[in-house]
Image: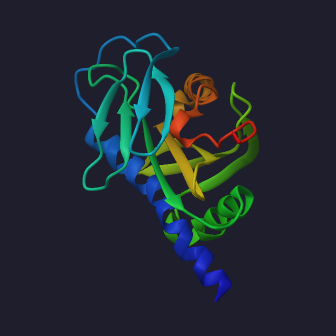
Amino acid sequence: MKRLWGFIIALVGLALVILAVTQYLTHRTAGRKKTPALRPGEMVVFSDRNFQFRMPEGWERKTAPPSTAGMVASPAASDLESNMVTTSESYNGTLRAYVDANLAALPKLAPTAKVVNELPFQTHSQLAGRKLKLGNELKGKALAQFMYFFAGPEKKKIIVTCTTPASNAAQMEPLFDACMKTFALSEAAQPATGSPKP
């Protein structure tokens, strides 16, 4: 029963892998222009999920229907064809256990996705997370996906899934890392510090 529960918990996390690929297809365009600057830009705040990070410069915040996940995507006219999809879910276990549950469920929920590596990841604010790198495929086109996992408030686990063509992976991975290094929980989500007043 414990194993089945872990599988169910991982549904939302891995659903992002599928959603990010779907949104990648939706936002592709025919007439693409020059690649914009590859550096972090303005801060995007996901107030409904209590976190924020700097999205790539020139990227746009978009909806990701039919889900309630948040998304930022490369400009429609650029040649990047990339996105960053975010969500969170409740999970009583540790971040390590949550990542393991997602890894265990991966072969059944995302059979075309293959694990390249899984490593620790730390933000500028010293928030410890995990980074999972995947190879995936969409209608014969090779994709690279980078999943960043963080522990949020009230037992929440936060996932940011970044998708890009595999041919862009070498230039996009450092950009995704740089943006995720700015990831931070909002002040309302931070644990209280200091001594209580008498």
User: What's the residue at 59%, 25% (across, down)?
Assistant: 182
Is residue 164 found left or right of 182 in the rendered image? left
Q: Is residue 186 shown to the viewer in this render?
A: no
The structure residue drawn at horizontal position 66% and vertical position 53%, both measured from the top left corner, is 115
Give the residue at x 44% y 45%: 49
Pick whichever, 90 or 33, lies toward us: 90
Question: What color scheme is it?
Answer: rainbow
From this viewpoint, which residue is outermost toward the bottom? 1
Q: Is residue 151 above or below residue 109?
A: above
Instruction: Answer with the quarter of the image where residue 47 lies.
Output: top left
Residue 174 seen by the camera:
yes
On screen, residue 125 versus residue 161, left or right, reads right
Residue 142 drawn at (x, y percent) = 49, 44
The correct choice, above or below, for 64 with respect to 124 in the image is: below
- Please say if 4 is above or below 116: below
Place of residue 26 in the rendered image (x, y in percent of width and height, measured from the top left): 26, 42
> Residue 112, position in %: x, y?
52, 60
Name the residue located 59 percent from the left edge and 31 percent from the top edge: 180
Looking at the rendered structure, the number of numbered marks drawn on it comes to: 0
Q: Is residue 160 left or right of residue 81?
A: right
Quadrant placement of the C terminus? top right
